[in-house]
Each structure stands twice: as C-alpha cells, then as structure tokens.
Amino acid sequence: MAPTLLQKLFNKRGGGAAAPHGRAPGEGPAFSWSSSEFDLNEIRLIVYQDCERRGRQVLFDSKAVRKIDEAVVQKMAEEASVKTSARNCQASNGNNISSHSPSISCMQNIKEQIPKYQYTRPASDVNMLGEMMFGSVAMSYKGSTLKIHYIRSPPQLMMSKVFSARVGSFSGSSNNLQDSFEYINQDSSLGKLSSNQNGLGTCRNGSNLAHSTPVDMPSRGQNEDRDSGIARSASLSSLLVTPFPSPSSSSSSSSSYQRRWLRSQTTSLENGIIPRWSTEEMFSMADESCSSNPAMVRRKKIAISIIFSLPEIEDAQRNFQDFFFSHFPLFESHMNKLKYAIEKAMISCRKIAESSQRVQVYISRVMDALGEFRVTIWNLYSVPRIAEPVWLNMMSSTLEKNQLCQRFLKEFTFLIEQINKNQFFAALLTAVLTYHLAWVPTVMPVDHPPIKAFSEKRTSQSVNMLAKSHPYNPLWAQLGDLYGAIGSPVRLTRTVIVGKRKELVQRLLYVLTYFIRCSELQENQLMWSEKAGEGEQVLNGSKITTALEKGEVEESDYVVVTVKNEPALVPPILPPKNDGSKNNSTVEWLHEPESTQAAPTSSKEKRETIGKDSQTSETSVDCLTSNFCKGAADGRKRTVTDTGIISYHTKESSKLEDVMDVKKNKNHNERKVEKQFSSKSSALPCPERSGHRSSYLEKVTFQIGSSASPESDLEAHRREMEENLNALIKNPEVIYCASSSTNLTVDASQNQEDNCEAAFIPIGKHNVCYAQIPPCEEKESILNQHMESKGTEVNLINSISSELLLPTDNIETVKSTNMKENRTLCSGNLENCSSDCVEADSAVKQDSPNVRPKDVPYGDSGRKTSFRVEGDIPRNESSDSALGASDEEGDCCIPDEVHHDSISKRLEEFTEVELPLPRSNTISSQCVKNFGRSLLGGYCHTYIPDLVLHGINNDEKLKQYLLADLFHAIHHPVLDEPIAEAVCIIADTDKWNVQVATSQRKMMDSVKLGKDVLVSSQVSSLLQSILQLYKLNVPADFCIMHLEDRLQEMYLKSKMLSEYLRGHTRVHVKELGIVLGIESNDLPLLAAIASTHSPYVAQILL
Amino acid sequence: MNAIVALCHFCELHGPRTLFCTEVLHSPLPQGASSGDISGQNEQAEEEEGGIQMSSRIRSHSPAEGASADSSSPGPKKSDMCEGCRSLAGGHPGYVSHDKETSIKYVSHQHPNHPQLFSIVRQACVRSLSCEVCPGREGPIFFGDEQHGFVFSHTFFIKDSLARGFQRWYSIITIMMDRIYLINSWPFLLGKIRGIIDELQGKALKVFEAEQFGCPQRAQRMNTAFTPFLHQRNGNAARSLTSLTNDENLWACLHTSFAWLLKACGSRLTEKLLEGAPTEDTLVQMEKLADLKEESEGWDGSEEEEKPSSQPDVVEGQELSKSSPETSLMPDCNSWNVAHRRLSVFRSLRHMRQVLGASAFRMLAWHVLMGNQVIWKAQDMDLVQSAFDVLRTMLPIGCVRIIPYSDQYEEAYRCNFLGLSPHVQIPPHILSSEFAVLVEVRAATRSSLYPTLFDDEQSLNKYEFVVTSGSPVAADRVGPTILNKIEAALTNQNLSVDVVDQCLVCLKEEWMNKVKVLFKFTKVDSRPKEDTQKLLSILGAAEEDNVKLLKFWMTGLSKTYKSHLMSTVRSPTSSESRN
C-alpha cells in the first residue's frame, strides 16, 4: 500500500528522465494512484495537554476517532447496539476515515448534525507518546519546541510541536472541553472505560512525578546573563551594530551570494547565538476577546504530534524518510496550519452549551483539518512532476544540450506564436520574471572570463568558495530561489496555470521551467580512507566489489560481493610523543591487512589455500571457521591495534586477507591479551591507532549452485579454537615466537612482491590510511630488547608508559599486571607484529626472503602452527609506491620536526594540540531529493499550495484556498525567515488572463483572484525577436544565447533604473522612455529586478 | 557545518555531563569573496583576527579546568567532576585541526570556551540525557527551539562491568541554529553517528568481556549482595570512557571523527549556481590584459622596432611604457578619476557636449560611433587624452584603438582615435574624407564664446574647438539610434553622470547583442543577403547608419566569443535540423 506509493514516487524521477516523445513536453508519465494505494489514516494526529495541576490529558487522538456510517447513525437511538458496534468497529479502526474525500462535509449547521464521529478509547501507546512529546521533565521554556522521534517498531516517524498555551482569563476554561471528553468517553465505552485512566481522562503515571522539578530552561532574555557570565547585550549588540562583514560588492552574483552568506552568518554558532526573528508561537485556547492570563501560560502546555507510519519495506521506508527530512519545511508549514485549525476548533466548540454537540463539533473540525493535512501530504507525494525542468536539465546534462535547446525553443516559439492572444504569454512571462527572480543572478555579468563556452554559463566560483568556507544550507537556498524570494522586500511566489486543455497547460509549464530557476544540487560523499578502486561501485557510501570465485568442492561459482563501509571513527594522526628522535633512514611500516569475514560457503576453498600455505591446515581451518562464526557478531566490535602509521597503498589478495583474518581473529579472541597489547602499543612511540578496515568489510556470498551449510562443523571448530586459545594464553613460551617473528624486513616483503602479484586475485582494494612516520630509533631498541630478553617486558612497559604525554589510570592498570600476562600479551601480539609490522629497520633486517620463524608450540594439543607471514603471503604491493604516497601526503601527514619539538612549549601556551585531518576524496553525484525536482509540478488534479509551479483544470479549489494559503505563507514562512508578501501568479488559459494575487490585498471581487498583469514591452519585444530569429532558422542554442543576452539587458536596465532612483523620489517615465525605451509597463519588472541588487529601490517604488 | 558536536554522559554521581565537544571556527570573511589578492588579505586578516579571537577566548575562560577557573566560571568545579565526567586530562589544551582548503578550524575541548555556547551545549546535554524521551532509550531524536538551538541527539549505552546495570549512558549530540539543515541532515548524521557509536560500543564490549572473564562482576555482586551498592560505587563507579574502551587515544580519535563528521556534513550538499556570462567589454579587457602579459613576457627591448613606431611614453602618468595602439588604450579606470584633478580636461560626455556645442558634438559622436577616424590636434596632451577617455565610453572596448599623441599622422586602420601635435600635417585626402573628423584645438580669442557657462573652468575657456569633416552630417539625417539616445541622455540634466554612465553601458550592451546576432548570421552561418536584411529589421537596425554601426562594432567582438561561435558551428550537433 504505502510502500508502493513511495516507491513509485521516487522511481518515477529516474524513469521520467527518459522522456517519451509525442507526449506533452516535460512531464513524466502522469501518475495516478487510487486512493486505496495510500492509506491516509497512516497519518495520525495526537493533541496532548500537560497541565501542572491536572497532569497529562489526551485532547485528541485520531486513532480513537471513528466515523459512523449512515447505518450506524440510524442505530444511534438504541444505545446498547451502538456500544457494541463501537467495539466491533474498533478492530477495523483506521481504515477509511477520509481517504476518498478529504472534505468531510463542512459543519455548517451544527445543531442539525447527527453525530458523525465517535470518540473511543485512545490507543494503548498514547501514554508513551505523550511522554515523548513532552519529555520526562517539564521545560520552563515559553516558546514552541520542535521534536522529531523515530519509533522503531512499528516503524513510525513522529513530529511534534510543544506550545505554551494561551488560556483565557477565566480559570479552568478547558474544563468544558474536558468534561465533554469525559462525557463521550463514558458514553462510548459503556461504563467500562469510564474509570479507565487511559482514556481521555487524566493519565497519571509514575513519570509524571517528574513534574515537580521542571528543568530550568533559562530564557536568554532574562537570566541568561546570570547563567553564562556574559552580558548578552554586549556580545549581541556588537554583532548587530557592526554589520556582518560584507563580501566584496564586485561579486557579480551578489544577491545570491549575499543571501547565502547571511544565512551562514545568522545561523552561526561561533559567537554564541544570534537572536533571530521569532514569532512567540503559542497555542491559543481562548478567543482573542478574552484577555490572556499570563499566570496560566507557564503552567499549561499543548503538544501536537503527527505520526507517520512508515512502510515496513526498508527501501520504501528510507524513501519516505528521505522525502520527509529533505522536505521538512513543507511538513512543518502544514503542521502549523493544522495547529491553527485545532486552536479554532477548540475555541469555537466552547461556545456550544450541550456537551455531546460540543464534542461532535470539536472532533469533526479537527478531523476536517487532519483530513486536509493528510490530503496535502498525499498530494505532495503523488502529484506529477515535470520530469525535465528545462533550466535544471540544461545545467546538469551537457550531452543532450543541443536537443534540449531545440526542444525548448520549439515549445517556446510555439507559445509565442500561438497563444499570445491579448498578450497572454507575454503577460505570463512578465509576471514570472517579475516575481520568480532567481533568474537575475544567472544573467548578472561576471567580471572574469568564462572557462568554457558561452552557452554554458559558468558556475559561480564565489558561491562555491563560500559554501566551502562558510557552509550554509543549499536546500534552503534552492527553495528560496524557486519561490523567487531573493529580492527586497522578500516575496514568496508561486505560479499556477489553469486550463481545461491539459496539453497546452503542460506546454506552458514546461517552458516556464526555463525561467523559474534555481541552483542544482549535488550530493557529495567525503571519504577519508581510500579511493574507490577500479571495478568498485560506490553505492550509498558503501563500496561494493564483486568477484567470481570458484567453488572447489561443488561445481558451482560464487559471486562474492564485498560491501565496504568507511569506518565512522576516524583514526587520529597523532603527533609523535617522544622528541629528538631522528628517523632519516627508516620508515616503519605498519601493515595491517584487511581481514575479511569470509562467508561459510566459500570457506572450503579458503581452507585449502590456507592449508597449503601454512602447512598446518588444521589450525588455520580452526581459526578460519571460528572466524566465520564470530565474524558477524564481532565484526563491528573488533579493535585491532596497530602501531604505526603511514599511508600506504596496498593490494592484497583475498587469500592473504583470509590468513590475516585468522590471525586477527585469534588475536581478537584473546581479549585479555589484546587489551594488554593495546596498552603496550599505545606506549610505543607510535601511538595506537584503531584499525577498522577489517571491521567494515562484510562479505556477502551469493552462491550459485548449492552446498551444504557447514554450520555444525563451524560450531565445533569454534569451541576447539577457543580451547586452543586458552592454552595459548597460558603458555609463556610464545613470547619467543613473538620476538622472532617480528623480524620481518621490508626487503623480505619486497622480495616477495613478485610472488604476491602473481598470486594476486584482483579484488582490488586500495587502502589509504593516514599516518605519520614514527620515530624509529626507540622502536628499534624496543624490538631489540624484545628479541634479546623476555624478561624486560614489564620494565619496558613501565618505562614507556611513563613517557606518555597523558598518563591515565589505564596505564596504571598495565603496570600492575603481572609478568605472565605481559608475556601472553606478547604472544597475542605476535600476529600483529608479524603481519602488521614490517620493519624497514636495518638493525633487524634479514637477508633471506625465506626466513621463517620457528614453529611455535601451540598449546598442549601438540599441534604446531607456523605463521609464515613473510613467506608466501603477499605483502604490500610495493613499498616504493607506498613511500610515494606518503611523500604526496607529506605536507599534511608528516609533522615536521619543529612541530613536535615544540609540543611541550605549546602546551604551556595552552594551545590546542594540532591533529591533521585526513585527506579527503569527494565522490559527487547529482542529488535528486531536492526542491528543484519536486516543487515544479505538472498538470495536477487539484490545486496544491506548496508547488512552485503547477497546472490545474479549474480554479475552483484555488479560489477557495488561495487567500488563506497566502496568509499562511507569510505567517509561517517555509523559508525560515520573514516574508513580506506572498504572491501567486495565476494564468488562466481558458479566459486568457494573467493575474497576480497577493497576501497584501484583499481579493478584488468574486470573479477576480488578483490584479491583472501589465505586459512589459521589454518582454514582448524579447519574445518577438526570439520568435523571428527562430523563424529565420537561427540555431536553437544561439537563440538561447541571445535570449540570455536579452535578459542580461533587462538586468542592466534595472541597474540604470536603480542608479536613476538614487537621486529621484519619483520616476519620470518619459525621461526613461526617451533614453532607454523603458516604459511605464516595464517599471514593475525592472523595479523587481533592481530590488535584488539595490534594496533601496523597493522603498521608492514598491 | 555550523554546528557543535558533543559527547555527553549521564554520570551516576553527577548527572548529565558534557564530556567532549568539537566546535567549528570559520574565518570571519568569506573566502574568494573577491579577487585573488583580496582573498590573500582575507587570509591574513583571518590569521590575525582568528588568532586574537582564539587566544582571548582561551584566556578568558577555561571552564574545564576547575583549578584555573574562577568561581563564576560556568564550568563544573573540580569537586563535581569524577573520572567519568572528564575527558581530557587536566591541563590538556584540547585539540585543533585546520582545514587549509577552507580555512576552517575544528577545535575540541571538554566544554566550549564561549560562555553562551557553554550553556547551549550544557542545556542540550541535559535535555538529551534526562529530559527527552527516546523510545528504547537508545536511538536518534531531534529537539530544540529558537532560543537554545536545535539538537540532533543519539543516546547509547556503553558496557561497563562495574557500573550499575553493567552499562553507562551516553549521547552524541549535534547542535545547530539552522534547524532546517539539521533536519535535512538527519539521515546522514544518523548513519555516521551510529557508526561512531557502534565502534565505541564494540571497544567497550571487548573490555567488558575481558573483565567479566577475569572477574565476573555478576557473580561477585551476587556474593556481596548485602553490601550496600553505593559503597562499591565510590570505589569504581567513575570510570573514564578511555578506560571503558581501553583506548588511550580515544579523545584524539573522537576529535578527528567529530571534525570529520562536521566537515563531511557541511559539504554533503553543494550547489551548482550559474552566473551570467561576462559582457563583451569584460572579455575584450581580459584578452587585452592577457596579450599584454604575453607581450611583456615574450618581447624584450630588441624587438621594439617591430612594433608600431608610434610615440611611446607620450602620455605622462600612463603606466604603460610601450604604448602600442593596443596597449595604450588599456582601460584605465584611474585615468578617469585622475582627469578630475586636472583642470583643462573633459570630465564627461556631457561636459564635452557643453564645451563643443550640440551640433559639433553630434558630428563628432557620429564619427566616433561609426568607427571613423577621430583626430584631435592640440598642444595640450592631457586635454587630448581626456577627450579620448570621454569619447571612448561611447564604444565597446574592442572598437577602441587610440594613439594618444603622435608627431605624425597614423593611418585609420591603426587607430580610430589619433592625437596630433598642432604642426603635424594631415594628408589632404584624410581631411576631405567622410570617414574622418578633425577637432582642432586652438587658443581662444578674447571674445570667447562661453562666458557664463564655464565660470569655474577657466582652463577650457582658453581654447576654441573646431570640428570639421569631409562630409558634415546633415542636420536632418536620423543617424544611428544609439546616438539619438545618447544625446537624449546627455541633454537631460535630470540624469546624473552616473545614470548616464549606466545608460551607456545598457546601450552598448544592447547593441552589442545585435552585433552578436549579425556576426553569427553573416560571418558564421554565411546567410544570404535577403535573410540578413530580415534579420536587421528584426533587430530594429535596418537603417543604413545602424547597419554601418553594427558592422563597425563587429570588429570589437572579443576573440573568445568569435572563436566560440566558430567552433560551435563546426560541431556536428548544432547542424541538426529542428523539426
């Protein structure tokens, strides 16, 4: 049901890109869902009251409201039957309140109405929801609070607003309503529920006790100074007096730029909070006629919540969430509308004396409003969008540009020629250019040369830079652009095309998407760990690699899909902690291979491989299988420590990974050991760093063919493995092994390079990790010590830990641990050392590439394992390349000597320790979840207030709602900034007129929605010359270039006008006319354009 | 991103506490707000201001340090802090990371140093851990208001074998004033923060399991069931997150992670915002600058003789030593201003028109607009220069070729503005040509014609200007449209000089746009004459003078533009038919 809707909603954008020919231009396939596809009742409304004295009360829960159908109404007389039916209905509650007709018949004549709704017991979760809405502790803050909760099961998204209530002066005014609820509650539940505290009555539970200690929410106006110790006035006034440092006025796209810059400044946190415009939003529960009682304000809170049930299917759920979060301003705006309706319902129903009547009025009013909300949200999803907004598409797709131009021009000239009756089209375009002003910055000439061709305007570099240095919200900026809210005073504009001829309306809509402009959004993914290698796709931040692996036992192939996420914890690049070490010759390689959780099905092959490699297959297999079992559970929790840090590029075969994995995992299982190890490693000069690569590699194997699941085996292996590990821990001899196996040299590994590459299975993982070259002298000595004597361990640790910059308790724990544990630590360390540390240290260097550590006694089982890490197992592909990489990143990764020499000095100066940020790779993709794609609507079945542009069949609904919508738009601006005027351009292709309705004027009469538009002669001459050029067969792209030039002329004329107005308070139109051909009908247009660059123009002209 | 990310903890002893907090510091001025050199200044300014700001902030308050902070400090006193409530050890200065590309700094401390931010974060922390209710206790929630900022909070547990219930409660919060952005970022933040939490929990779980392995607390607690719990708590309750995760560098790691989170979230969405194409004047100017640069790099003195042997260094105050026709007419905005300081100069077209008289000016302007050679003969070089500076404003920059002052006559193809000293002989065919106009500046007789008009400008009074041409403009001739408009603008005293300037910009661009179409039509597409005629009438430029003007102005088109048009016509896509 809902999932289908949402899926379609999002799929259609992708699908619409391949626009079919022969259809009206620009509009994707028209989508129509039967209302049954979307259960509107999945949107639930709860109104709650929290009163100090009376506790919490549900004032409304749409889940508890049932519509009584006609048959039931008939039976209403018979009390008993009603009650039973009520309970029966309850089971099927939530099916159809208003899905087909949002406009539940208006309650015009209340007294004659038969009850249409029945209010039953609120759902059981209402207490919990109330808790979430208000919080467990009351807040003393007066203004409105916004909250969003995510409820996991069943998946729901709850959006709440908590208001302080403005109550009438007569105390206990809400009692009336309350009584009413109690009345209906008793009535409907036949006494059974009358005593039930979960009903509409007060719900008191334990948590409400917390009311006695409201959390102090200092309002900044009053006691903030006490709180922070700084006078707000001081910091704020200084900010207000000194205007924001204004960017250079030479910037051509100044208005766009300025707007964005201001946004980033006003929402800045750096210098404390800047007071923004705020409507002291309250919930009014009394008529304006009643004087408000300030004493009551603090005590009573009203919360309104809207709960969206999310589809169970994960994709659909994510789609809805994406839509919700990216379009939140619209959701919020509609919620405000709903709140207003609830207020009115509460106030008006109070005037009704009779209790049951009162409830009926209240419920039906709120249900009406909710129905409207539901339908609006539904509309917002389901309306057809323009699949190919011209401007946006021209901006983003360079390939098809010529076709795009031709197509647009064809439609454009068709309209100029065919439908310019009464200058209709010219009037429409005049209005659109006058109000949807975002085109102006796109024609403002820049003072730097273009990079590319002319038709391709360049992207604004200054804005790009701003976005980097002072990030603002591009979605917000885009919304403002679309609504044309970039002038001064800020006007918010929408355009509606009315007409019975669908095809014509669609053509108009399509053409207007060239003139209603906004920025295109790009989604960027910042990666720090590595670049996506060849053959890797990046999908939602996860890298996906696929490889075909041959099954050895079964005659089947496996597609191994590796999903790799970047770890969320970014390893810090720590400054070295010991001074004075010179590391000119040595680079310590800390090589931590990626480990993989191989999936069970592919294990057999792996076992083989590993078995051959290590010659002690059993142990390996044990490890491996244990890994399989543990993999999923431990994968994310694993911490692998490695010590040093340098960036490297490496490719590793999956074989290696598996072997490493064995080791890691074993190491991992020895938690105690590892804990010790990490303490130790942090004590080393090159501090510990968490390695995550292994944790984030999830291998999913899709088996082609079949094989028996070795799960039972695995379990056995796991146990065996654990026993072995325990034995290992107890065996102090292992230290020996540790010391010998650390003696790997880079040479050795380099010599293996060729082998490695031969054996390399190109799964192709590139790793970049960021690190520093640690000072090695000390490390060397440590290792030497390590080799020479096992007994020095404890001392070593002690001595090193004392060198730590920031000693903590943790170190002390280490100190106190006994010798034995330290030894085992070392043995646990073995794998890390052998696999991770490739020493480039000449002191430890060994000549033979085939050095093998001694076989290590492995537990009491008599098995032996050899960690032949240096032998057959590929190392990093090339240490040269790795070195190269480190050179590249040297500037940011390798701290210079001076830097860490001076650390102690800097400490004294109380300067922060500098930690470099990892270098980032950005993966950009076009963002579709944006307003530019969603608010340019097509030919819709009904009028929709949110859309920047859409077409409708007739203006019936428009007439009904427009004025209220306009007022709502200025009172609850979606743009999060004050709006001076809301405007709607209405072009009627049946009557051939274009009108502008505004929130500032009342409707003139019942026939007219707004004021007729004056046709600008600039615009009509522009249209004519484009048409003529087109007819002369001037190529389409050139015609468009000319069109842009002409728009630029308009901008220049507006510059002249603003210059003129500097010295004049009145415009002598004649003067302008003679000189520049500006006529009086051009003035509104030019003045509006001028208002984007010269705010003072508005004061004179508007 | 304009946000603060903080790690909060609900301490069993002290309640909700902010543990670690990463802030973003932007440079006070936007980068690249203007041209390169200015941005360089910005950087410097940022360095200074940022430095001052930083140090003052640091010195004014260090709430994390109970010892150094005075009693009024918003930070909790040391006695109120236990290991669990603390992140960075006493005396630790915090962490900082610089993002050089964006000059953004990410700074981490236990608490924000700014007092107001301190309380904002504290408020958010308290709400996140002890007021707002999240179903299941672990999970994301958004809350906030205009006064205290908006918060995305994610609560979670960390395993602790010594804690009550074997776990401790934490939250990671993101605070912003821009609620729309914060809500827009919910899916992103949830993913990233969840990832950080998972890793922290993973680390802690390992420690926990290791501890349980060594010394199972549950069993121990069972055995000592009757010992008051508090007793034990005093010993061990307050464990730092570092020890719970056994990660020495946890705070450094969190700093990097939070900074990264802020950076990634801030750059998650970017806009592609188009701006208008540069005007032709801008383009030509750029090209000339580029040429000049190339020239000064590629040529040295030895090759000077190859260049036009015009008068170098004639004009004082002119920066350019090599004043080839090209270079000498470099747009020099200053020369305009400089002109104001001199007395015997023209200050504006309107001024010139007043000095010369309407009809003489009209004749002169006509010739200028049509690209005919304008020769000024005068003793005073400054005067000539100022005349050219004023006159050239009527033309697109690309159409202006000036030889400001020469000792010999220069051909028209080399310059359309030529300054000559009075004794230079002008070839007679030039004097009689209809494609040239001569302005002779002579010393005025005592009976000067301008007694009242120039009271304040004695200097121009001493001259007499004689404008002559081979074919004087007929008074009844309509002339190019632009000329009439210019005249109208100059005549109307209501229009200030600035308005007139803006007017000229408009007119020139308007006509250059026509030029572009004509160029495309005739030069690129080589369309037949009849079509061209149609086109001209579409452009409103069918009259002879307008056509002439367009043709002359076509020479002023920038190379960039021309080559662009030429190249697109060759590309196969544009030749597609449209049907």
Image (cartoon, coloured by chain):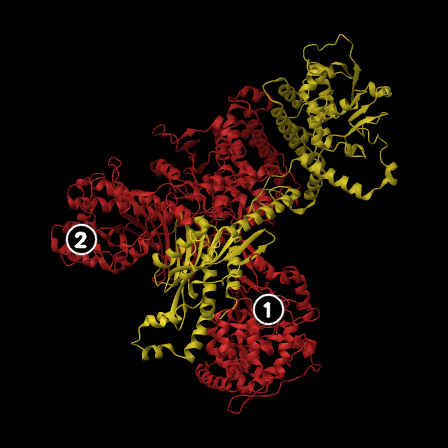
Chain colours: A red, B yellow
Label 1 neighbour load within 10 Å: few <14, some 14-19, many 20+: many
Residue appearing at x 25%, y 35% in the figure: A289
* Horizontal and vertical percent position of residue A416: 53, 33
Pointer 2 residue: A185
| Observer able to see residue B548 | no
Pinpoint the chain carrying mark 1.
Answer: A
* Horizontal and vertical percent position of residue B553: 71, 30
Which residue is at the front of the view, A928 or B23? B23
Report the side of B41 relative to B309 (left or right): left
Marks 2 and 1 share the same chain:
yes
Mark count? 2
Report the side of A830 relative to B458 (left or right): left
Which residue is at the front of the view, A529 or A761? A529
Report the side of A61 relative to A38 (left or right): left
* Horizontal and vertical percent position of residue A40: 32, 52
Pointer 1 residue: A765
Q: Classify B346 as above or below A254.
A: above
Give me the C-alpha separation between circle 2 and circle 1. 65 Å
Q: Secondary structure at mark 1?
A: loop
**Nearest to N terminus: mark 2 or mark 1:** 2
| Observer able to see residue B366 | yes
Q: Quadrant of residue A256?
A: top right
Amino acid type of the residue that numbered disc 1 sits on in the rendered structure: Lys
Q: Quadrant of residue B544?
A: top right
Which residue is at the front of the view, B150 or A235? A235
Pinpoint the chain carrying mark 2.
Answer: A
Amino acid type of the residue that numbered disc 2 sits on in the rendered structure: Asn
- Extreme top residue here? B447
Q: Classify A472 as above or below B352.
A: below
Q: Quadrant of residue A154?
A: bottom left
Q: Classify A716 as above or below A168.
A: below
Q: Secondary structure at mark 2?
A: helix
